[in-house]
């Protein structure tokens, strides 16, 4: 290995008998937009194993020193993470709350003994993180030097089966046996008449406040290393959040509980030197959420897909009501593509309003381009177009269906889809609307 590049190609691995040719060409270089995650992961795992073996045998002194420095610098989270991942493998993927009691409760002697017996596996997990951090840092530096900034997306909650909950159970709503007592979700909304039940524990904000929100601050600092700007998913939960009692099968029977409000953002500002955030303020949002967003000065979000309902003249999503300190999208990763939205999700009245507003004849063939131009023409400081809309794709290219667990996040771009005429269209809009 030289720097961050593995000096082995898939062809070499096939020739050496380390990978099966069908695996490589089916998963490593697929010709479809949909990813087969299990197949791709199998190939990737083999590649990682080979690469790590190569590193341990052939790494330069500088690479070894860099790895040691990384482990020392990131030990405050890396040690627990690597131990957790290795235990997950040991228990064949079972969640931490089903592990033997000593590991479930993080008995120091048991963890030390396991760590000593599995040092090679633990070091491999750390090495993967080392390579990822190194490569991401190089990519970010390269991009920033060319005027490209990275926008990250931070989930509000974390999974019950996560290293965060395993190592910090005191800041989550768990009982003495580490079972969840309060589950996160949202009430009935645009996406689901039963609401959404996320099977993630809500936070103990009293405990977090007593620590000065240290866990959240560490989380934000690490994300700031990765991204120039961070979208705070489910921003409304900083104001109030929907908590569902354990045992409910749907989210209807929950209740609103107060979040930390502006206090946590005061802590962020002091620790980060600013608030580099975008507030995802969509869905069932009260006036209090908007007031919190405006009090701390965050940009909110406008979605054109939401702009053409009965409230169109006064909707916050319609362009004539946009403000500069906001971000406008055609739709986000949680929405249908614009063509899919037009075909499957709009009513005749919404289509009529859309045509009237655009003063154009709208159809499935031009709706993506028309909304893309409308998005770019907004006064919002930032305009974001999903690539599926840039390409004018239908619902088959949808990225995610909220409140479902299957067939999501599998779409990907193929190089042949990026054509010169698409670049020319974007260039025209960027110049026309000073983007």
Image: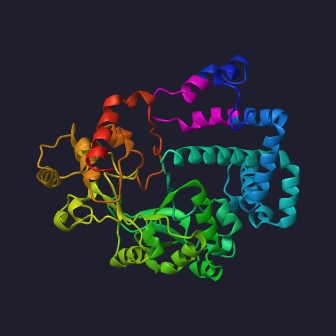
Pick the quarter of the image with the N terminus.
Answer: top right
**Residue at position x 84%, y 33% from top?**
57
360 horizontally vs 400: left or right: left
> In the depicted view, which residue is nearer to us: 39 or 270?
270
In the rendered image of this protein, does residue 259 appear above or below residue 13? below
Let me know if residue 151 appears in the view. Answer: yes
The residue at the far top in this view is 15
Let me know if residue 395 appears in the view. Answer: no
Question: Residue 290 placed where, x, y %?
Answer: 36, 74
> Is the image coloured rainbow, by chain, by secondary structure, or in one colour?
rainbow
**Which quadrant of the view contains residue 181?**
bottom right
**Residue at position x 57%, y 62% from top?**
158
> In the depicted view, which residue is nearer to us: 270 or 30?
270
**Which quadrant of the view contains residue 37?**
top right
Which SS does the magenta portion mostly show?
helix
> In the depicted view, which residue is nearer to us: 240 or 252?
240
349 horizontally vs 28: left or right: left
Question: Residue 386 placed where, x, y %?
Answer: 37, 46
**Residue at position x 17%, y 40% from top?**
363
**Residue at position x 31%, y 31% from top?**
421
Question: Residue 295 placed where, x, y %?
Answer: 41, 78
Question: Residue 27 placed where, x, y %?
Answer: 56, 29
Part of the protein shown in magenta = 23-47
162 horizontally vs 278: left or right: right
Q: Is residue 36 magenta?
A: yes
Q: Is residue 158 magenta?
A: no
In the rendered image of this protein, does residue 138 appear above or below residue 421? below
How many circles with numbers are drawn on the protein? 0
């Amino acid at each position: 290995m030289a720097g961050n590049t593995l000096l082995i190609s898939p062809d070499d691995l096939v020739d050496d008998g380390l990978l099966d040719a069908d695996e490589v060409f089916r998963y490593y270089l697929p010709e479809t937009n949909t990813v087969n995650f299990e197949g791709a992961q199998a190939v990737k795992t083999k590649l990682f194993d080979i690469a790590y073996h190569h590193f341990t045998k052939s790494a330069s002194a500088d690479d070894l020193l860099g790895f040691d420095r990384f482990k020392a610098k990131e030990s405050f989270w890396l040690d627990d993470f690597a131990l957790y991942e290795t235990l997950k493998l040991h228990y064949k993927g079972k969640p931490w709350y089903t592990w033997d009691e000593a590991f479930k409760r993080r008995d120091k002697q048991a963890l030390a003994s396991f760590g000593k017996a599995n040092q090679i596996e633990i070091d491999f997990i750390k090495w993967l993180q080392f390579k990822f951090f190194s490569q991401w840092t190089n990519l970010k530096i390269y991009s920033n030097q060319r005027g490209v900034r990275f926008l990250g997306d931070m989930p509000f909650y974390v999974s019950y089966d996560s290293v965060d909950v395993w190592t910090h159970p005191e800041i989550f709503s768990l009982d003495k046996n580490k079972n969840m007592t309060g589950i996160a979700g949202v009430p009935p909304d645009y996406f689901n008449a039963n609401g959404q039940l996320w099977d993630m524990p809500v936070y103990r904000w009293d405990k977090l406040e007593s620590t000065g929100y240290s866990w959240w601050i560490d989380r934000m600092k690490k994300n700031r290393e990765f991204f120039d700007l961070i979208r705070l998913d489910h921003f409304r939960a900083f104001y109030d959040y929907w908590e569902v009692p354990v045992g409910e099968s749907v989210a209807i029977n929950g209740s609103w509980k107060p979040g930390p409000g502006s206090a946590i953002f005061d802590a962020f500002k002091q620790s980060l030197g600013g608030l580099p955030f975008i507030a995802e303020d969509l869905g069932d949002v009260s006036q209090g959420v908007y007031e919190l967003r405006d009090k701390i000065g965050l940009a909110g979000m406008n979605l054109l897909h939401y702009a053409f309902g009965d409230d169109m003249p006064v909707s916050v999503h319609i362009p004539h009501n946009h403000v500069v300190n906001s971000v406008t999208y055609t739709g986000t990763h949680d929405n249908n593509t614009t063509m899919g939205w037009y075909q499957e999700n709009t009513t005749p009245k919404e289509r009529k309003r859309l045509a009237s507003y655009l003063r154009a004849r709208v159809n499935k063939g031009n709706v993506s381009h028309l909304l893309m131009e409308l998005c770019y023409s907004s006064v919002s400081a930032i305009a974001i177009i999903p690539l599926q809309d840039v390409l004018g794709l239908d619902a088959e290219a949808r990225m995610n269906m909220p409140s479902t667990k299957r067939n999501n996040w599998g779409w990907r771009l193929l190089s042949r889809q990026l054509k010169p005429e698409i670049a020319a269209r974007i260039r025209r809009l960027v110049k026309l609307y000073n983007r």
